[in-house]
Amino acid sequence: MNFTRWSARLPGTQRRAAARTDHAVAPDRPADGTTVPAARAEPPPDKSAPAPAVDDLPVREVLDRIPALVALVHGREHRVAYVNDAYVAAFGVRPLGEPAHQALPELAEIGLLPLLDQVLRSSRPRTLKSRRVPDGGSYTFTCTPVDVPGPGGGHGVLVFATDVTDHAEAAGRLRASESRQRETAVTLQRSLLPQELEQPDDLRIAAAYQPGGTETAVGGDWYDVITLGGGRTALVIGDVMGRGVRAAAVMGQLRTAVRAYARLDLPPHEVLQLLDGLAAEIDPNQIATCVYAIHDPNEGRLVYASAGHLPILVRDRDGTVHRADDEATGPPLGTGGWLHTSGSVALGPGATAVLYTDGLVERRGEDLDEGIAALASALQGATGTPQVVCDRLMRTAGVTAGHDDDVAVLVLQHPVRTGPQDELFRNAALDLLGGVEAAPRARAFASGVLTSWRFPTDLHDLGVLATSELVANSLQHGTPPMRLRLRRTDRRLIIEVTDGDDHLPRRRRAEPADESGRGIAIVATIASNWGSRRTPGGGKSVWCEFALPG
């Protein structure tokens, strides 16, 4: 702005001199600076008179009447040269000729004076948005460089402030409302996640969940650990697309459904098939990704299926890190029309597997594969307990309270056992041949194994009885090959019989005249838990468990 042209529109020397002595207070205002409402009546507008040109308007009078706050400061010391009536009404009389840090303390307290220096140096306007002044409202300040006329000449800054108090208060109320909604979603999300992870006998597991930062609505990330019985464990991690309470609610429904389907002891791809149909029913417009995996200590492998989720990372005992095969990955849940498949990855003693959501590896401007490669590199050097590994992966990925996305991580280890601990985990197996001698041979084998494991007499006898009933059931209703397996952990005794027939037994009430149908009922009565499942080869497995004393 050229101040020479602006000053040419002002009244004459006498008015300017008066303005310097009255501190920019209008002549009808008392000397103490208080405002006296004008009593003069405005004449009716002359509709026949032509509108004045912009250059003919008295700028001083225009600035005095506009509702925005206007101040003019001059020189490097920012001496006050002018303030309009709106500025005086807002902050009181400002003494002209004094430096801004004294005459305009409200500007100094909000940090505007350094901005004035920048405007003078760069000759470019600057804006300070929505700042709250002491004991006042909120204003947006625009500072524009101007040329100051007169013998001394020089440069000044025109400060133009707009009252945005209502807007700032409305924005504050909106932020408070969004904060309450986010707290509700976070509370719902955390309440739907496992409050305490199940710890299976043959795995050590840790998990972490970090919601997005305060400016980010919480998402639908979740994880779960489900003991299936017979020593097997299901592990789940998923991510519902979208944010807020709706995403958290859909996540809760899917997690509940996964736990229900897991009780059926189905293969991973069949569980995802059921989830896919359910997700479409819950909300056709909302999709989710998920990995469902099962660990069987007898096989030393992790069997899994993925619905559009990120690959599982596995660190072997020697430190080698590899990704699970992508061939077992199908489209996300809720898309429909896809037959999922299961794959497997080795998870022997000393191995560590990591399941995670995209918030751990996805960064703006970076390829997703780069993030997965960085996570694999971090996993390669991560040793210690699952919780230590989990914390290290989160730190390496830069996940903090201000992270821009939800993060869920599930770390599982198949520990290496040596010494006395190794003595607690034992396996014994016997291949069964048909014929009348199969059942007595199975009972003798079980009795010898349980005696060698030094179980109490009552547990020994119950184990032999359960073995006899399971083998008799398999001999009567199953087909070869048949196999008996006894497994001992630090907390339970597991007895399992497999055969080549895929018809699952069910517990039923036997009538007094029935000659069969009591075996499974006896096993269910004496054991802590029992169950059955189909095996990948087309047969079935029937098992029961006994809790160890102490």
Image (cartoon, rainbow, N blue to C red):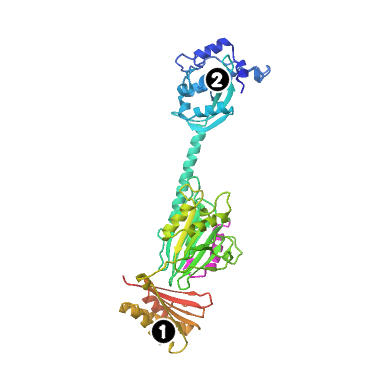
**Residue type beneath disc 1:** Ala
- Residue drawn where x is 51% and y is 70% of the image: 266
Tag 1's secondary structure?
helix
- The image quarter containing residue 419 is bottom left
Residue closest to the far bottom: 436
Mark on residue 64? Answer: 2
Mark on residue 63? Answer: none
Numbered range of the magenta stretch = 260-284
User: In the rendered structure, does residue 273 fall within the stretch colored magenta?
Assistant: yes
Q: In the image, which is nearer the foreground, mark 2 or mark 1?
A: 1
Residue 240 visible in this rendered orientation of the protein: no
Find residue 236 and report its horizontal and vertical position in percent.
49, 62
In whole angstroms, how far apart are the C-alphas of marks 2 and 1?
Answer: 105 Å
Find residue 82 and report its horizontal and vertical position in percent.
53, 19
Residue bearing the label numbered 1 = 442
User: In the rendered structure, does residue 113 fall within the stretch colored magenta?
Assistant: no
Residue closest to the far front: 318
